[in-house]
Amino acid sequence: MIETLAISLWSYMFCGPWSEYGKAFGWLKAWATYRLPYVVRHPLIECGMCHAVWVAAGLQAWRLAHGATFDAGNILMILGASFGALILQDFETLMEKWKNS
C-alpha cells in the first residue's frame, strides 16, 4: 500500500511541479520536448498517470524476476498508483480553477 502511494506521489510530482521550467527536472522536460518522440516523451515526463503505470509495472516486473509470485496485488498496485496520480492531477486542476476564480 505504501509503495502505491509513493509511486502516485512521485509520478505526480515528477511529471508536474518538479518538471516545470526552472525546477529540478525542468531541464529534462525541455530536453525531451525537442529530442524524444511523443510516444516516449508523454509517459516519461508529461503524464503523471502514464508515468505511474510504467513505474509500478517496472517494479512488479523486477519483483517477478527476483522470485515473487504473480497475484491480484500486482495488478491492483498498478491500477492504484495510476489512479492516485490521476486524482492528484485533478486536485491540482481544481485548485488552480479555484485560485483563478
Image: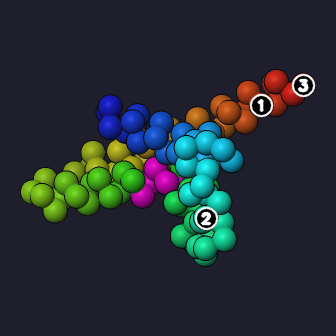
What residue type is disc 3 on?
A: Ser
Q: Main secondary structure of the magenta part?
A: helix
Locate residue 6 relative to residue 23 in the image: left or right. left
Locate residue 13 relative to residue 71 in the image: left or right. right
Residue farthest toward the left in the current orientation of the protein: 67
Q: Which mark is residue 31?
A: 2
Using the image, determine if residue 14 lies above or below residue 87.
below
Magenta region, residue range = 50-54
Q: Residues within 10 Å of mark 2 (few under 14, many from 20)?
A: few
Q: Is residue 16 visible?
A: no
Q: Is residue 51 magenta?
A: yes
Q: Which mark is residue 101?
A: 3
Q: x and y percent of residue 74 in the render?
A: 28, 50
Q: Residues within 10 Å of mark 1 (few under 14, many from 20)?
A: few
Residue at image coords 44%, 54%:
53
Q: Is residue 24 visible?
A: yes
- Work out how far the residue at label 2 is from the one at label 3, CA to CA, in angstroms: 34 Å
Camera-nearest label, 2 or 3:
2
| Mark 3 vs 1, N-terminal side | 1
Locate residue 61 relative to residue 7 in the image: left or right. left
Residue at image coords 82%, 31%:
97
Provide the secondary structure element on which disc 1 rests: helix
Q: Quadrant of residue 77?
A: top left
What residue type is disc 2 on?
A: Trp
Coloring scheme of the render? rainbow
Using the image, determine if residue 23 lies above or below residue 55.
above
Using the image, determine if residue 5 lies above or below residue 56.
above
- Work out how far the residue at label 3 is from the one at label 1, CA to CA, in angstroms: 9 Å
Q: Quadrant of the C terminus?
A: top right
